[in-house]
């Protein structure tokens, strides 16, 4: 009787020993010291709290640091035109506002598989292959700029027009297709962003790129970094890309990715899968942060064709540095080859 409620509690705690007759430990060690192991109920409570806390942390994490993925243009699709309007970034808008006739109605991006024909892309691919026969980076990224003549070679650049073979490789057909394609892409940019086509000028650098999975040797080989074109190339106002080879067939990896940041940790990756003759175009400001995934196999060929609204940054179409005498020879040889110079372009 005298142990009353205390003995009842004690019995409950020791329930399961079956006898109730085992000598009790002195009460002081279980009730007030706190040094013994927690009861089953306390353990359950502790686990429930841990599970709850992990759940809360996971919810906060997945709603705060969220990366979504969208496919803007897949390899299988043949797109007439796909567009995504965007608000211009403030610095871009401030700068572009200085150029009357060249201010886009909205910033944004587009993709079309109908601007350039696969045959035209094929001729430009031949040109690219012929050019890169003369020089390639020893890392994974080579460029050929037919305007300045810059061609990757080893860890440096050479002037392709100083190489005697260049004159044999670049044909009139190449030149004409290059100019015609550039004019069509320029018109597409003007149409899409509602600009006067004359307000747009081709600018430097406009170049062929050849990407592989070779280990980078210099900073020029690290093509996969996120960037804003306006920051990388100050003259750019509109960037276009023409793809010459197919993602998933000619190469793996190497997709083009826009990174749309909505808030600090919340972003959407918007993918363009390269496809022969596919053209993408976009305003070159911070609204179009992007990168190229690393190529994991094969060879990816593309052309970056860049436009500026600033007349002072305009550049002429390439002449391929052929003098008149050489042009005469070109014409004669073209006649011998049935009107084209395809026979002179070597495949790798
Ligand atoms: O080749 C591409 O898809 C993109 C290249 C690029 O981002 C650039 O030239 O600035
Ligand atoms: Fe870029």
Image (cartoon, helix red, strand yellow):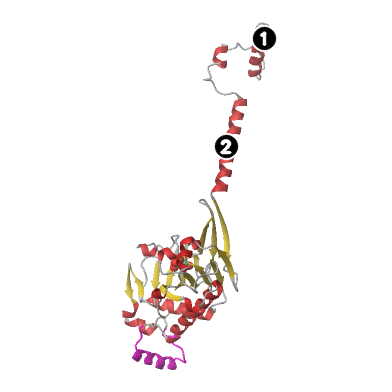
Whether 7 is drawn above or below 282: the answer is above
Residue 260 is at least partly visible in this image: yes
Whether 223 is drawn above or below 146: the answer is above
Within-10-Å neighbours for mark 2: few <14, some 14–19, many 20+:
few
Q: Main secondary structure of the magenta part?
A: helix
| Tag shown at residue 58 | none
Looking at the rendered structure, the secondary structure element under dot 1 is: helix
Q: Position of residue 277 (x, y in %)?
A: 53, 75
Residue furthest top as drawn: 2
Closest to the observer, 299 or 100: 100
In the picture of the structure, the residue carrying the numbered disc 1 is 4
Q: Does the magenta stretch include residue 341?
A: yes
In the picture of the structure, the residue carrying the numbered disc 2 is 53
What residue is rendered at 58% in x and 60% in y?
Answer: 70
In the displayed structure, does residue 341 sit left or right of residue 60?
left
Closest to the observer, 317 or 286: 286
Looking at the rendered structure, the secondary structure element under dot 2 is: helix
What residue is rendered at 44% in x and 83% in y?
Answer: 174
Quarter of the figure that contains the N terminus: top right
Q: Position of residue 42 (x, y in %)?
A: 60, 26
Mark 2 lies within 8 Å of ligand 1 (Cβ measured): no
Q: Is residue 153 magenta?
A: no
The region drawn magenta spans 321-344
């Amino acid at each position: 009787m005298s142990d009353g409620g205390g003995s009842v509690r004690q019995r409950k705690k020791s329930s399961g020993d079956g006898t109730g007759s085992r000598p009790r430990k002195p009460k002081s060690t279980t009730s007030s010291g706190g040094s013994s192991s927690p009861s089953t109920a306390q353990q359950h409570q502790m686990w429930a709290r841990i599970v709850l806390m992990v759940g809360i942390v996971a919810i906060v994490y997945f709603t705060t640091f969220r990366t979504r993925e969208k496919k803007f243009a897949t390899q299988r699709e043949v797109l007439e035109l796909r567009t995504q309007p965007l608000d211009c970034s403030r610095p871009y808008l401030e700068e572009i506002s200085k150029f009357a006739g060249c201010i886009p109605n909205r910033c944004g991006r587009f993709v079309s598989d109908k601007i350039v024909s696969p045959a035209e892309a094929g001729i430009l691919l031949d040109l690219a292959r012929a050019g890169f026969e003369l020089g390639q980076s020893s890392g994974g990224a080579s460029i050929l700029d037919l305007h300045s003549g810059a061609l990757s070679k080893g860890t440096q650049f050479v002037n392709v027009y100083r190489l005697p073979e260049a004159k044999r490789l670049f044909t009139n057909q190449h030149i004409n297709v290059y100019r015609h394609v550039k004019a069509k892409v320029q018109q597409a940019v003007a149409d899409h962003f509602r600009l006067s086509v004359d307000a747009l000028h081709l600018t430097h650098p406009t170049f062929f790129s050849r990407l592989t999975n070779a280990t980078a040797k210099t900073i020029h080989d690290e093509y996969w970094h996120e960037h804003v074109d306006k920051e990388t190339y100050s003259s750019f106002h509109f960037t276009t890309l023409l793809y010459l080879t197919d993602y998933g067939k000619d190469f793996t990896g190497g997709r083009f990715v826009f990174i749309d940041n909505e808030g600090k940790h919340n972003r959407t990756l918007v993918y363009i899968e390269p496809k022969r003759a596919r053209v993408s175009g976009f305003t070159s400001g911070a609204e179009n942060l992007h990168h190229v995934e690393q190529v994991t196999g094969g060879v990816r060929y593309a052309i970056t064709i860049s436009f500026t609204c600033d007349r002072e940054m305009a550049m002429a179409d390439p002449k391929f540095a052929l003098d008149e005498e050489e042009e005469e020879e070109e014409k004669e040889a073209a006649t011998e080859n049935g009107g084209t110079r395809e026979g002179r372009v070597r495949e790798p």
